[in-house]
Image: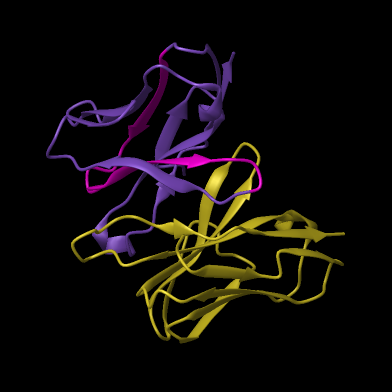
Chain colours: A purple, B yellow
Amino acid sequence: QQQVKQSPQSLIVQKGGISIINCAYENTAFDYFPWYQQFPGKGPALLIAIRPDVSEKKEGRFTISFNKSAKQFSLHIMDSQPGDSATYFCAASMANSGYALNFGKGTSLLVTP
Amino acid sequence: DAGITQSPRHKVTETGTPVTLRCHQTENHRYMYWYRQDPGHGLRLIHYSYGVKDTDKGEVSDGYSVSRSKTEDFLLTLESATSSQTSVYFCAISESGLVDAGELFFGEGSRLTVL
């Protein structure tokens, strides 16, 4: 069964707006929560990641918010740009499964000019 | 960019034929992974390796086998390809367990079509 649930499936945001993608997980053994960005024809690439000992991490326009008690985490893209148009995947992993990532189903983001 | 090469990048084959996809890395990373990506399913783990000759199954391992005889190479084999194995296959590598634990680096993908 899918261990990480992601929403929405698709998102359209105007340039300059805020894009928000949400994920939820069940397994409390997960200890690493990354977000990956994927452009058509390319492999996914790490965007930003967080560990459960912090509630927020910010890198430039990208912020992860993490709620351990609710088992939820989200990606916020501030001042969204057309170049941010891509598919975004949340994921989770733990040490005792070879650090393999369990991915959400992805969110297709379109930022309109 | 992480030194990961997948081959072939594109392949069309017929149902029932064997297929082997190769992942080659130049980073000397311990962990290697094979994922498949399908519309509406995201990326799903097929098999992974945590060292030479050490492998384990992932979420969707049925119909696939893997081998890792050298640190740099991880092979994914479809013994008898089926149409349901039409997909884009991604190899990933990681040096998790050390200081920068967690990040997986992905290859460019191999698109397989089974007719």
**Residue B12 visible here:** yes
- In this picture, which residue range is highlighted in magenta? A18-41
**x%, y% of residue A44?**
51, 48
Mark count: 0
B7 is higher (above) or lower (below) than A50: below
A18 lies left or right of A30: right
Picture quarter containing residue B50?
A: bottom left
Specify the farthest residue to the bottom. Answer: B69
Going 87% across and 59% down the picture, which residue do you hit?
A: B115
The reply to whether the magenta stretch includes residue A19 is: yes
Of the pair A87 and A82, the residue shown nearer to us: A82
**x%, y% of residue A112?**
59, 14
A99 is higher (above) or lower (below) than B72: above
Of the pair B100 and A8, the residue shown nearer to us: B100
**x%, y% of residue A107?**
52, 29
Picture quarter containing residue A39?
A: top right
**x%, y% of residue B23?**
56, 73
Going 46% across and 42% down the picture, which residue do you hit?
A: A2
